[in-house]
Image (spheres, rainbow, N blue to C red):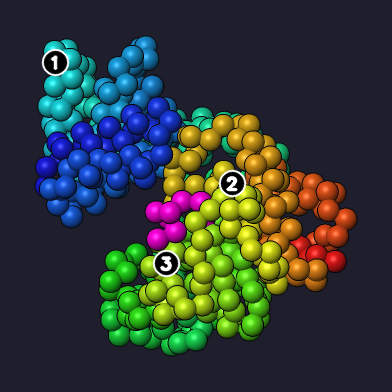
Amino acid sequence: MSMALVQQLAAQAVEAVAQGQNLQDVLAALRAKHPDLTAQENGALQDIAYGCQRYLGSLKFMLGKMLTRPISDSGLESRLLAALYQLHYTRNAPHAVVNEAVEGIAKIGRGQYRSFANAVLRRFLRERETLAAACKHHLEAKHNLPQWWVAYLQNHYPKHWHNITTALQSHPPMTLRINRRLSNAEDYVRRLAEAGIAAQAAAEYAVTLTEAVPVAKLPGFSDGMVSVQDLGAQKAAELLNVRDGERVLDACAAPGGKTGHLLEWADCEVTALDIDEGRLKRVESNVVRLGMDDRVRLRCADAQDLAAWYDGRMFDAVLADVPCTASGVARRNPDIKWLRRPQDAAKTARQQETLLDALWQTLKPGGRMLLATCSIFDEENGRQLQKFLNRHADAQALESHVLLPNKSQDGFYYALIQKQ
């Protein structure tokens, strides 16, 4: 494996996110430019790029403690952060990490940073434990979250905020949804054991793996027996509880995990809607793998532009999985922690209002709509529900749930609303 190339690309990813770009998009572009990367190199690139975002608060703090003034060259800073991640959070040989990082940094400018980089990284190796201990006394470094985010959690979840910040720093579990038409958790755990994969039941139709594996290794995956889906995300189909013969709208359906779950739940007819044609193809591939594409109508359109897709036939149930800050799934997408701003939740909440009002028009009297977000910010959740109820006299909230991130699941919000 070329550690030098991996460090270089990971540093480019760190720099791009610092400039406001989405990490998944950045990595996809880097891989497209470097199609010859080996599986090992791709894995290492993913680990460093994601790891730097997961622990960015502590990495920047420890780097800052070793400097007399801020680094003005963003490329240099990103290289150092990538190397510090490797030295502190991986089992890479320290001398190899330092040597490759210093040689790579020597190519920046006219080589004027070589001795500086060498001094910083070797100092880190000497003072690592002292620097790590100092992180515990610095809010952003300890929780690896922006200070405004920690303050928000302290204010809104005074009893749970510390558990939330701990969860958001952890690696997410790989949880599977078992197709209830084909098996259950107990039986599938046995099948996994026969395949040499350790797992345990998380619910009647959910299984959590001890360690993540490629989906190709999962028994029955290609036959639709099992899908990868967070335990909290599986709550959506349970709450909406679609029934045989119902017409169901899955608005903002991509990538299709919840669409598939609805189809497994009952013999319903689903219209899966998404504004992005490329993402809609992922919905299609998901339902084809499940063998249920004959019961899905795929439409590429803006859900709030009813004239573009709605034929006037009302739905029995609507899954309104609305766009949000994705604050509840930040451990899966750790760049979210640093890309979001304090005003973003209020901004997305205003966009959600228009969408929810449009979707409400497509729901039959007596029907139900599930407001769903992968956020833990109240502006997009409980406050959004209350505003919706205030605007619609024919709306009644049947139940609402905040699922906080923990070792078993990501963070979600659900509100089941009935049309009177």
Numbered marks: total: 3
Question: What whole-number distance in Å separates the C-alpha atoms at marks 3 and 2?
Answer: 23 Å
Please tell me which residue is depicted at 13% across the width and 15% down the height of the picture.
Answer: 111
Residue 284 found in image quarter = bottom left
Q: Nearer the viewer, mark 3 or mark 1?
A: 3
The one nearer the camera, 355 or 62, is 355
Asked if residue 242 is among those painted magenta in the image, a careful observer would answer: no
Question: What whole-number distance in Å separates the C-alpha atoms at marks 2 and 1?
Answer: 44 Å
Horizontally, is 63 left or right of 271 in the view? Answer: left
Please tell me which residue is depicted at 57% across the width and 43% down the height of the picture.
Answer: 325
Q: Which residue is mark 1?
A: 111
Which amino acid type is marked by label 3?
Answer: Glu
Determine whether the residue tagged by mark 3 lies in a helix, strand or loop: helix
Q: Is residue 184 above or below residue 405?
A: below
Determine whether the residue tagged by mark 2 lies in a helix, strand or loop: loop
Between discs 3 and 2, the one toward the N terminus: 3
Q: Position of residue 354 (x, y in %)?
A: 69, 45
For label 1, the crowd category at 10 Å Cα-Cα, with few meaning under 14, some 14 to 19 and many 20 or more, is: few
Which amino acid type is marked by label 1?
Answer: Gly
Q: Which residue is mark 2?
A: 324
Q: Which mark is residue 284?
A: 3
Query: What's the magenta bit mostly, secondary-structure-wise?
Result: helix
For label 3, the crowd category at 10 Å Cα-Cα, with few meaning under 14, some 14 to 19 and many 20 or more, is: many
The one nearer the camera, 43 or 17, is 17
Between discs 2 and 1, the one toward the N terminus: 1
Q: Position of residue 172 (x, y in %)?
A: 44, 57
Horizontally, is 206 left or right of 67 in the view? Answer: right
Determine whether the residue tagged by mark 1 lies in a helix, strand or loop: loop
Q: Which residues are magenta?
A: 274-281
